[in-house]
Amino acid sequence: ALASDLLQKRKTSCEADGDTDSIPTAEEYQTVAGRVVGVVMRMRELEQELAARVNTAKWVAKYGEHGTFGVLKSECKRVESGDNPKTIKIDPKSENELTNRIRDDPLFRMCRAECLLAIFLQTVEVPTLLEVGETVAGGSVVDFLDEDRKEVLLS
């Protein structure tokens, strides 16, 4: 419902601006909705993968750039401890901190969403589409991240 509601708002906004060329097509609607569902269904695994990838870039910790990727320093520390991501118990304090940061900081929220989507595209969508010989509207190219984040997340 979230994706559908947002896409409907986009359509309404485009119509109000007289920009009917920017109204998403039915295929684009399906692609966006499928990606939202795909990321949500794999949220914990994608979050752990995001923290693990960010943790490999030493410059992120050195310059305190965790927020650029939409992750908390504490998330990277959990990954660093070597715990199995599937069995990690997230303590309520960290979960609360993350929830508050996502709610209160739109830039952090956007960065996290972009990074989770990029990892989803690389690890789930592209391999799956290649396997079945299909494509999606607009392709599966990660062209929405800056070069620094691409280097950390997709290398």
Image: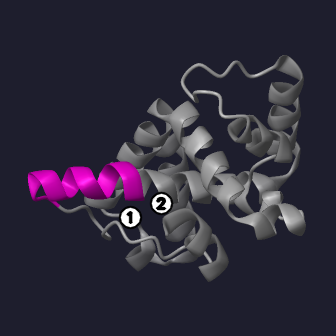
Find numbered disc 2 in the image and state the secondary structure of the residue it sits on. helix
- Label 1, on which residue? 24
Q: Look at discs 1 and 2 and give the one toward the viewer.
A: 1
Q: Is residue 78 magenta?
A: no
Depth order, front residue of 34/75 = 75
In the figure, 46 relative to 55: above or below?
above
Find numbered disc 1 in the image and state the secondary structure of the residue it sits on. loop
Q: Which range is magenta?
A: 122-134
Whether residue 110 is visible, yes or no, is: no
In the figure, 105 relative to 16: above or below?
above
Whether residue 102 is visible, yes or no, is: yes
Quick check: marks 1 and 2 in contact, CB under 8 Å?
yes
Q: Residue flagged by tag 2: what amino acid is it?
A: Lys
For disc 2, the neighbor class at 10 Å (few under 14, some 14 to 19, many from 20) is some
Mark 1 vs 2, N-terminal side: 2
What residue is rendered at 48% in x and 78% in y? 19
In the picture as drawn, the residue positioned furthest to the left comes out as: 133
Q: Position of residue 64 (x, y in %)?
A: 89, 63
